[in-house]
Structures are given as structure tokens and as C-alpha cells.
Image (spheres, coloured by chain):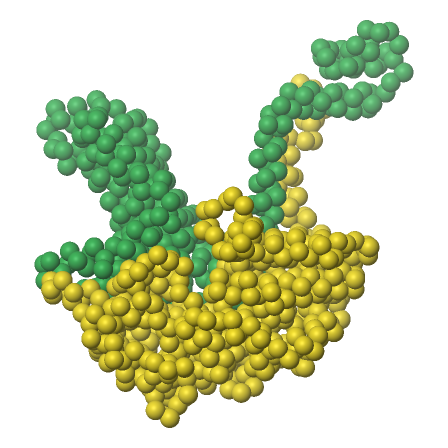
Amino acid sequence: MSPSRRKPTISRRSLVQSAAALPVAAVLLQDAARASAPSRQSSVYHAPAVISQSKQEVTHWVYSSLPLDRDTLERVPPDQSENTIEYFEWSVEQFKEIEPDIEVKLEFAPHDQTWFAKIDSSLAAGIPPDVVQGPVSEAAKYIPLGALSPIDDYMTDEERADLVEAVTEESSFEGQNFLWPWRLSFGGGIQINATLWKEHGAEELLPTGDTRRWLMDDCLEAFKRTTVDTDGDGTTDLYGTVLMTDIHYHVTQFLFGFGARLFNEDETEVILNSPEGVEGLQWLLDLENEHQVAVPGSAVRKAAEADRLFLERKAATYPSQGSGTRPASLDGVDDFEWYWVPPPNVEGKEPVVMTNVHGHYVFQQQDADRTAAAHRWTQFLLRPEAISLGLNQFGLPPARQSLWGQVTDENQQVGLRFTDIMVGFGRRASAAPITFTLVPRMLEAAFSGQKSPQQALDDLASEANELIADAIAAEGG
Amino acid sequence: MPSSWRHHRSGIGPTRKVEYAVAVHSSISPKDSEFEHRRSLISQRLRGYFWGYFFIFPSLAMFLLFSLYPMADSIRLSFQRFALTGREWVGFENYQDLLQDDEFYIVLKNTLVYALAIVPVGVLLSLILAILIFQLPTPAQIFFKSAYYLPVVTSGVVLSLIWLYLYDPAFGLLNYLLGTIGIDPVLWLADPRFSLLSIVIMIHASQWGGSIILLTASMGGIPKDLYEAASLDGASFFRQTVSITLPLLKPAIAFVAITGSIASLQIFTEIFLLTSGGPNLATTNLVYSIYEQGFIRFDFGRASAIAVLLLLLTIGIALAQYRLLRSNVEY
């Protein structure tokens, strides 16, 4: 080869190296473009541009599902596929008859962590859905961003009057309402296996009356009577109750019965570390450690496991959430008398139940007609006859008072009375991490003995108040 | 221009000297001729390798799009604050917040404890088992290798749920067995003294099958005459193992150690399902912390910063192991 001849400039190695550099270059170019673009002036969300059309398409993300018989509109088993229609799809068909120019597209997705990631990423991409099913605690995240459309201009006076004041307050932010209320979700209540209570001499302690209120001492006594070695092998195989830490309001409802509260009135501070809170938490820990009436291992137990232990009759009660609807898994099980009661309280104190108003919220779109179409659909979805249809099926009481008279089940009637003792989940951006991370971690620390009740609650308050301060600062910015 | 010259200039056949001679005797300058030659060589090479690039292009594109680009973006995100309204450049603030957070050091400590508790014991365990299995007749070898490998191909979720039952303090099998010999029930997952250890035990019981198979395969590659010579010299089984098997297995052991370390730094499924990182951070490692920061607290900037630190830690440990354990082995 002549010395003057040079090798070709592009080798295989350099080709692959160049290809690998492409993504990095893409990232850097994005930054450069962003740096040269005018920066956003405010933190308010800007709705995407949508071309206005005479026919509107409304996307609705839902996570609840209820299969109905097409003819009778009665609930059918999930595995039945003949002559069935899903509850929301039924409403879509009905809506199409009165609003043929509005096409509703339902999208079903599980209500787990991916649900939130999906909404957030669609919002960040500028293409949020029109309507999303969810409780007010989840909608609260998007309200400060200006991403949601208030419902006040669309809600009729009759609808407004049909709501309990506490429900309206819970769904309102600075005088505007952002949630079409559908159902109430009570984050408290105790499920009792009354059959086991009767078998083991605790029947007299079953709460009775319209409200079924009961005292903490009676609760503990009942737990003791229903903690039994049923087969005489020396080990306890039925426990009075089962506790968990991942869904904190299942167990902090006991603390509330001592007079403790999670937030102060204006949600500027966590106050669970009050003397009442410490007393309540100690009482809770004693259930497992001292009295041994709670299934051991509460520190890392999840609600799903606790539910299973209750249904398997290894625990006679299960502090949980709901409305007083007997679980569907007990359908056809005759020897399980299911009983629903509020959380107990000490003398002179009122219990409270953290309550979430469930419904559907509408994202603001640049096309006002499209937003209006979304409101029309959601309003139609929440008509009384539709809510009546699913009254006993979805397991959550309706937010509309006019429908409460249709509730005939005793347990559900007790559940409806929870509206007298409801408090919100918190509406600031800090509420979610407090609920899903900090309080569970506090319970884990206390149940595992890593911290004393006072220390655990103080650390919770300290950390949570920092988050609240950040959230308040962000709201003001 | 004669057609033969055009044929030569197409790049098929003519040598450099011939082409140069053609160029000299034509109106084309030497410089143009050199450029043409270079272009024709490149064209030749590309044609030759075209199908190779064609077939690797889909995988390469997937890798660039779904692995390398997200990785680069994640590094960038670690220097930003993420909000639904957009990203804001904050420099090293996420890293500073992490390094000033006591929780981060707890999580880092847990991560290193996982690695230290899993890798050395796991490598030793799989080595001993591989040596023992290798001595068995082939049918027995097949049985035991399959038995140890089965958990590796079983879903992590399924395994975790089974161990959740085993570890149940009130109704689980382990405490039942302990009760038969008079030992009090243990809070395997709820007691911070045992929770991390319980996860480590689960990993040891279910994840080393692949290493066992790799080591037994490597042992199969060791020449038998080395063992025969050692036997003739009176070497015991133990002596042969220490002096012949282990040194010649060093590359395989290094591979098992390095890959095991990388895997142990990234445990997630077992922690998520058994303890959710609790009680109170007792079992939280860096990967679980990334999940918590990103998908529960929606602080993707901080989560990315943790991911970058984990990447640096993993690279550092892998490099150190490689330097320590590398060897040139010749049979």
C-alpha cells in the first residue's frame, strides 16, 4: 500500500460510537432549545390548543367497573359475558340518545400507582383526558395548577341542594367546586364477624342503635373475648382484630376516638402528636404487645393481607373503610354474619372518620366547547337514576341526600350516618405524601418498637409540617 | 474516455497504481482520483457490512431509544426539579439535599449490607453446591441443577408471596416449626432486627441456581488429567479442590461475584412485596428509595439523583471486583 494512501474516515467502531452519541446529543439539544426559549412566567398550567369541532369527543378515564345484565340492569358475576353491559358503557349509550354530537370514549385502568403516573404524564405532555374518575383528594393536586374546570356554572340549584354541606365543603376550593360528586368513601369503620362474636361470648358487646356508637373499653373487651385457641393446641388461631400500617386511616381511626386529629382546622399543621394522639397510639400498640389480641406482625402488614385474614376467620374484626356494604366475596356464605360499626371512642370524645368524596373531575381544555361537553357528560353520568342503579353494587353511599331513603340495608344505613363524623383527607399537595408515606412510616416505627409513641408522633409532625409549609409556599407562588 | 477506464473507476478490480496511471493519462487530476478511490473503498466496505448493520439496527435503535436516551435524560433530570408545569434547572441541589438527609445514609447502609450479606455468602454457597453436585452421576446432577434453577425462573412475585406466607408470624410455616421445638414465634418481617435478614435468606434460597449451573459447566471444562495427576501424587479431594478446581474456576467465580453484586444492589420486588421497605426504612435500599421518591412523592429530580449515585456505586464496586478477581487462566 502506498504511504500516501489514508484509511477510510469512517470505521465500524466510529459508526457505533456516533450512534451512541446521538441520544446524548438529543438530550443536550433539548436543553439548548429550552434555554433559548422564553421561560414560563407562572406555574399555572396552560391548556393545550385543540381545534374546535361541531362534534365533540370526550375521553373519560375510569377505574370502577360493574357488569350489569342488559335487560334487568342487575349486577352479574364478573365472569358472565352474555347479555351484559358495563355500568359506564350503559350510561354512554343512554347519553348518546340525548347528545348525539358528543362521543364519549371510556378508558378503563387500574387505580394504582400507574394511574397517577398516567394522568401526570398526560398533563405534562399537554394532552390530559377530559374527565377523570377520582376522589377530591386526588383532584386537589391539579387545582392549584389551574388544570381543572370548576363545575359551578354547570351544576343546577337542585343538584347543589341535594348535597350534604360537608360534602360540598370538601369538594370546594376557595369558593369553587371542582368535583362532580358521585359517592362517599369513608376511610374508617370496623367490619365485625358477628358469628364469631356470638360463638365466643361477645354478642352483648355488639354495638346497636341507629349509629352503633361504642366505647373503647367495650371494643377491647370484645377483642379479648374473641382471641381464642379454638383447637386447644396451645397456639392462638383466632385473634380479636388485625392491624396494618400501609393504609393508615384504618388504624388511626382509633386514635381519633381518643380525640386526636391529623390536621388542624385550616390544614396548616399536623397535630396528631397531641396527648390524645399519644394515648391512642399506645392503646393501639398494646393491642398487639400487651393484650395480644391483634395478629402479630402489624408493623409491615398490608391491608390486603388483613382483609384476607378477616375473611378466612382468623381475625374476628377488621378495621377498614367502606360504607357498610357486605363484601362481594361473602356472597353465598351463610355462616358469616357481617356487621358494620363506626370506630369506637372514649367517653366524652367524638369519633371521626376520614372521608373522601368520590366523583369525576374535568380537565380544562383550550376549546371551551369541549370542556362544556365534558361537563354535560359528567352531569348526565351522575343523574339520580344512574346512581340509584349502582347504589348497592359499588359499595359506596351516594353523595346525593335524596337517594339515601333508598338505602334499606341496616349496615349501609349505619354507614350513611358516618357523614355526621366525617373529616377530609387533606387538600394540599402535602396531603398525599403524608397519607401514603409519613403516617404509615410512623406506624411502622411505633409497632416495631423503633420509636416510642411520643417520639414517632413528634417525628411525624416535624416532617409533615415541613411538607405542609412547602405546599403552602408553592400555592402562594 | 475509454469504457475500460470507466470500468476501472467503478472500484471493482483495479489496483491503486493502475488507477493512478489511468488518472495520469487522463484529464482527471491525482487528487480527484484519490478521492474517488477512497469513496469506492468506503462504498465497498459499506456494501460488505450492509446486511450486518441492517440486522442489528432494530436492536440498536431500541437500545438507543429505550435505554441510552432515558439514561441520559435521567442524568439530566437529576440536576433539575420536576413539576407538572415543567422542569427547572437546580444544579447540584438534589445531590446536596440527599447528602444532607439522614434517611439517605440509612438507605445507603442497607444497600451495602444487602450486597455484603448476599454476595460473599452466595458465591461460597453456590461454589460448594456446584462442587458437590459435580461429583454426582449425571442423572442426579440434572435433578439437582433443575431443582436449584427452578426458583430462578419462577416469578419474583410468586416467590415473594410464598415467602410472605412462610414468614407469617401467626400462621406461617416457619414459626410453626419453631413452635414444635419450643422456640417463641419470630416477627420475621416486622422486627427490624430480622426483617433485612429475612429478605437475604429468601434471596439465598431462591436466586443462586444460575450460578450453580455456570460453575458446574465451568468445572466440566477443567481437564481431567490434572485431577488424575494429582491423585497419583496422593492429593486428597480437598487438596485437589483447593489447588486445581478453585484456581481454574476463578474467571467463573469472578463473573458470578460481579453479576451477583450488580443484582444485589438492585433488589426491588422482594422488598416491595414483603416489607414495602419497612418497618420504618429497615429494609429500604436505594432502588426502593428511587421508586418511593419518584412514584409516591413525585420528586423525579431527587429520584434521578439517587439513580445516578447508585450507578456510580455499581460501577465502582464492579470495577474493584474486576481488578481484584481477574486472572489469566490457561489449561
Along the viewing direction, whichever of A99 and A257 lies nearer the viewer: A99
| Rendered residue at 26%/42% (across/down) | B126
Q: Residue furthest front?
A: A72
The image quarter containing residue A205 is: bottom left
Inspect this view and state whether residue B249 appears.
no
| Vertical arrangement, residue A88 with respect to residue B228, above or below | below
Along the viewing direction, whichever of A131 and A433 lies nearer the viewer: A131
| Rendered residue at 25%/68% (across/down) | A196
The image quarter containing residue A109 is: bottom right
What tint does the image give chain A?
Answer: yellow
Q: In this view, does A14 lie to the left or right of A55?
A: left
- Find residue B258 and report its horizontal and vertical position in percent: 38, 45
Q: In this view, does B27 lie to the left or right of B43?
A: right
Quadrant of image for the N terminus of chain B: top right
| Rendered residue at 45%/51% (across/down) | A77
- Find residue B110 and report its horizontal and vertical position in percent: 36, 62
Chain in green in the render: B
